[in-house]
Image: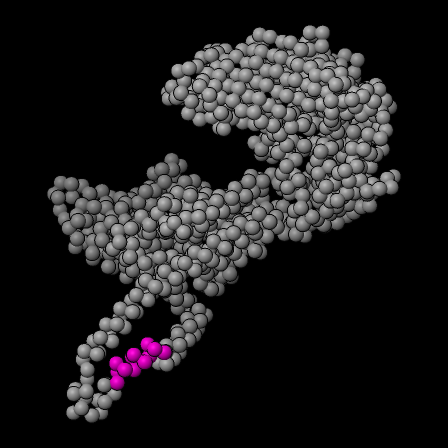
Amino acid sequence: MSLVTSLELNRALSNRINNAVTSKTKPYSPLELQRYGENHVAEFVDKSKANLRIIRLGTIFGKGVNQISDEKIDKLFIDATQKHQIEIDGEGLELHNIIHESDAVYGILKLTFSEDTSGEVISLCNKNDYTTLSLAYKLLELDVEAKAIKFVEREDADTILQDLYIPAPNATRFGWKQNITLEDSTIEQIEAYYEKSDRKWELDKTVGREKGEEEEKLSTVSRTKLGSIVHSLTKPFRRIAKPKEFFTEIDYFKILKYFTITVISTLLLYFLIAPIIGLILGGTLLYGQGKNLNTAITELDFDEIGRNSQNISQNTGRIENNLTKLSWLFKITNTQEHFSNINQIVQGTRYFSQSAQDLVMSLRPLGEYLKDFEPNLASTSSETHMVDDYSEYLSSLEDNTYILKEGIYTMTLAQNLINSVDTAKFPKFTRKYILEYKDLITKTSNTVKPLERLTLFLSDLLGVNERKRYLILFQDNSEIRSTGGWISNYAVIALEGGQIRELFIDDIYNAQATLNLKNYSSRTPNSMLRALPNTTFSFPLVNWDPNLESVLLSAEQFIYDLGKGTNLDGIITVDTSFIQKLLATWGGIEIPGENELITEGNLYQKMYEIEPDIDPNSLRSSPFLTNLFDSVITKFFSSKFNDYKQLHSVFSEALFQKNISMTFKNSIARGYVNENGWDSNIDAKFLTTPTSIDWNWGVNKATLYSKKAHSLEINVRDEKTIDYYYKVVIQNDSSTEQYPEGEYRNYIRIFLPHEAKVTGIRGFEENRQELYEESGYRIIAGWVNTPIKESKTLEISYRLIKDDNPSNFILRKSDTHYELDINIYKQPGSKKDTYNLSLFYPDNWTVEQTDGLSIIENSASKRFELSSNEHYYISWQR
């Protein structure tokens, strides 16, 4: 005997129990009655050992089902067959278990009369779970009345935040097999709903026409070789009109021979030859389509993404069908692992195409925005046109975030499935392509995943709801300063509705002159007073603090005093090296007042034609730099999206080498640029090594003619003590005191951890240095001036000791390992200095991982160019 209950009700009961708010049920409700019945049967079996089992039946589909018992699925079919769009409450991620009526009857009979199922609780349904959203997509594929999906916000308060239900073992474990596919079940159910509503399904005509064409094709095979064989086999039977000769002329051996050959040939063709050819061709096509899809995603070509993902989906289905036909071959050759690996690639590719389709749907507003965007800049930098607003695109991009998250999740599943494939299980000639396919999926995933974070803040940065204002600082890194260089010019740009609404560009010394006339002044930071006691904090010196977030807050007051905005939402710094790379890509630029094109080759020559005043506190106005910055900014923001593609490598290199830095007030955007190291902040992670910040105060470009060599020795004495010895050698290759060359007058600040115990300092001018604490750092500061054709050396040593708060100590200790992260900070705008890193540790420590450091006995070392921030992870076995 069997007790047949509802799997749907059991899932609902489980979710109610797991959700404290909705855990109560009404007495004598279907939920309570089913729970009582199952508990009663289970208790009876335990006591009497009776031949009973509980069969939990999934939601039944089929021609004979006029109304589906699951209300959500019933509504899907009603909408699909009677409305122009399918409405889904919430996100459509509820899970459903489905079974065809024929499979249900067969399953109940088989499970009831099987002794292996006695006392068991069994789920009788298709092995796969289906979400409401996936069923809706399946309905749309079958050409029903509805052509779109609409998501409706839930109005009920009993929403299950997470489905924790774990169903009983599936009936497939007890010998039951699903015979009716989901698609066939769905087609029958659609037909039932159409008949119920007295409407005709247009798919019937298509199916009928395809069947007719297949029959017509079959009728013409009589002229093929197979047709000739059939004709020969049936020849004796055509003499049936002569009964006496009929049996005498039949060659039974020949009939059996031809019949056997025909059957074997047909089976080999259908189950071996055709599937193998299909797999080879399908795999080749799939590889090419995957590369095309990766290119389309990289270029944000959404039309091409849609076409390629659809092709991949169709091709994957054909490959899966051919692989199923070959399953017998893997079984008899005992190579099921090979089958499993191939199937992993197929299923991973299916997820890959599904993810691409979600990306198309979620990111299409971004694609339309980039395609339709028309820059809003007039011929002068201070005026703008009234043009289109793109707020609708940006709002849609925000609304589609949940679809993008689902696409990213599916992409992660695809990546995990494909990357876990054992390449050794494939033939040698295919392994190269399997590895390339893995790399392709990984590259695509790495391209797509940042888009999820980007869409969380991009609309806000572009002013979807209100105007956003940003400050751009132009810094000359041949005269190094804290955040990249001497500031000569600035720009204020305002965005609203995805469009440029304001753009103002000026010489920063003109701005300071205006502030002086208005008698505006600002409080000078204590650290600046220590270094430059006769200098007043001003707009040109706003980048004294190396942390760009602090610069943003300081600059906001100057912009407010100038009347250029009440607040700033972000800051971007660019240096001369970046401008030079832009000019190389553009081929040069024309600027007012110049008779020749300004290119990367003559840029520095033009910049240094006019010698400035020898006083660093004077107003150092430069018409050339102002016109250059104006022309570059105007050209850049006058470009369309397609023009930016050629600049991708320029921006990537500039961000990596810190020729561009940025930060924003939007917390998500700020976190994103911080994770990528684009904000130039000296975060706590960089306090694992000394951080050097230079400030050129010589009113020259001696930085351009100087070289620096860093040397750092880290000596791990034991698990509680670490000694540091840091040395920097500055060599001034200037050959004359004449501008732009000259003495390198440099104020250096060395940032150390707050708890550092300084044990030695040597190299500052006249052995005079400042030791103070600021913003959680211990700072050693002083002048290191290097005359022309000379070099100077600065040496600092200090010790870190583990205190009562072990979380502050850079050496981490676990049950099995010691771990150390070494993060080295590169000052924005600085050159590619040489850096020599050496690490020493106790003799009895066994090093396990060094991240590329060379190991000699109990030391690790590496010499490199400091072109960007560096990170090394070292671990030792305890």
Q: Residue at x 82, y 34 (%)?
A: 606
**Residue 123 vertical placement versus 243 (above, below):** above
Is residue 269 visible from the viewing direction of this image?
A: yes
Residue 51 appears at what percent x and percent y? 14, 48
What percent of the width, then of the height, locates residue 132? 42, 51
The residue located at (19%, 87%) in the rendering is 249
Q: Does the magenta stretch include residue 226?
A: yes
Q: From this viewpoint, which residue is outermost toward the left? A: 48
Quadrant position of the C terminus in the picture: top left
For this view, does 310 lie left or right of residue 696? Answer: left
Residue at 37% in and 53% down: 70
Asked whether, in this view, residue 130 is left or right of residue 405, the answer is left
Q: Is residue 233 covered in magenta?
A: yes
User: Where residue 437 sits in the image (x, y, percent)?
Assistant: 46, 48
- Picture residue at 62% right of the left edge, 34% below the top: 656
Q: What coloring was used for the rendering? A: one colour
Foreground residue among 647 and 50: 647
> 739 or 250, which is in the foreground?
739
Q: Is 299 placed left or right of 128 in the picture?
A: right
Q: Can residue 390 be seen in this view?
A: no
Front-most of residues 265 and 131: 265
Quick check: 255 above or below 121? below
Residues shaded magenta: 224-235
- How many circles with numbers are drawn on the protein? 0
By secondary structure, the bulk of the magenta-drawn segment is best described as helix
Q: Position of residue 173 (x, y in %)?
A: 24, 49
